[in-house]
Image (cartoon, grey):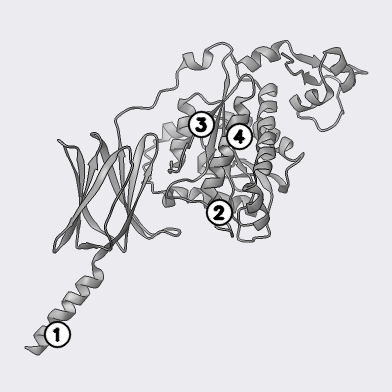
Amino acid sequence: MKKLKLSLCMLVFCLSVDATTIEGMRVWTGPDHTRAVFDLSGDADYKLFELNNPPRVVIDLAGAHLKSSLAIKDNKDIKKVRFSTEKDKVRIVLDLQDQLKSKSFLLKPTGEYGHRLVVDLSGTTKAPIKTVEAVTHPNRDVIVAIDAGHGGEDPGAIGAAGTHEKDLTLNIANQLAKKIDAQKGMKALIIREGDYYIKHRKRFEKARQNNADLFVSIHADAFHSSKVNGASVYILSQRGASSEAAKWLAASENKSDQIGGVVIEDKQDMLSKVLYDLSQNSALEESHKAAQSVHASMKKVVKLHGQGFGQANFLVLKSPDVPSMLVETGYISNPSDEKKLKDAKHVSTLTHQIAEGIRNYFYQSPPPNTWIAAQSKSKKHVVQSGDTLSDIANRHGTSLDAIRSVNNKSGNQLMVGEVIYLPNMN
């Protein structure tokens, strides 16, 4: 009898050890969805179903127990969280503000996170579709999509002083957007507007749906050596990385979907892939021009990492038809860079140079039917023998600095036959 009691006690102990503990809950709210994340001690057996009148989502976790109570406040989609515990399960009820569609999945441990159950809640509204009319409207603004890396579940790199990359990138993106909007003929589109995660593909899809002419992804990453510092500009490479740092950064950034919580669903057939690659090759040429222009502008006043230009296989840059670049604003793993990226004066200088490079690119390669293209048609000069930059400036009533800026020049050297773009003085 004693042996039987001992066996039963051991069985109960084993069950209690193996039971999944619900350790806590976090909620992230974006413009088109709300994400509830439940931290778990291990894998889970769960069921999820939706109920109406009133709208709610019910989650049953078998063989689980709660570590502490769950609560939520001030959410646009979830009114409150209720829960109950029974002998063999925990039931969690999300009372919703309105009827929403739910999607759920389990995530294995990655980065600083352990096992997680993710529940996404979203409405049924569809994103606007890119139309021919939108991009052929005469004298339209050029659209610059600015993407703040990471967000929500994914903090990105974390600096020695505890700074989260996701917070720095959002601030830099917002400051850059203000400088873009201050330019006539240009308009900024912020991809991530708050503290929530967007998977890589959704980021460039949002740019495409809003007819973006350029996609700029902002980051402040980490490296395994804290001595590495400086800013860089990267474009997509489908063959290989241009340096150890580029390879490291791409691998780090591409893991964000795992940390942020994304189920990979790629059902692209062979024909779609061929068409995608053909379209992307054209976008890569423009990506190189735009990135070189930003790089040339930044290097005037911003400390660069090495040459400050590279290529790697960044997933977020894989838009098939929007020129794209990734700006590494500095290394948060370097204490000096971390401090600079929190300094308002440095951020202002940095974003001014990025905006200048973007502006120069569009004046050199204006998209059709844009206001900048209309200015460029009659605002150019073909260099003749004996021309100097100062003569051209005087002849056209502009300044030497303005001509250098538009043409991405650091000096006064000219070549016969070279086309010099003249700034609009209106």
Badge 1 or badge 4: first in the primary sequence:
1
Above-or-below relation of 71 to 397? below
Badge 2 or badge 3: first in the primary sequence:
2
Circles 3, 4 touching at the beta carbon (< 8 Å):
no
Circles 2, 4 touching at the beta carbon (< 8 Å):
no
Circle 2 packing at 10 Å, graded few (<14), some (14-19), many (20+), is: some
Circles 1, 3 touching at the beta carbon (< 8 Å):
no
For label 1, the residue is 6
Q: Secondary structure at mark 3?
A: loop
For label 4, the residue is 176
Of labels 3 and 4, the one closer to you: 4
For label 3, the residue is 320
Residue type (three-letter) at the residue carrying disc 3: Pro
For label 2, the residue is 163
Circle 3 packing at 10 Å, graded few (<14), some (14-19), many (20+), is: many
Disc 3 versus disc 4: distance between alpha carbons? 24 Å
How far across and down, in percent of the image, does residue 75 sit? 33, 41
How far across and down, in percent of the image, does residue 186 sit? 60, 22
Residue type (three-letter) at the residue carrying disc 1: Leu
Of labels 2 and 3, the one closer to you: 2
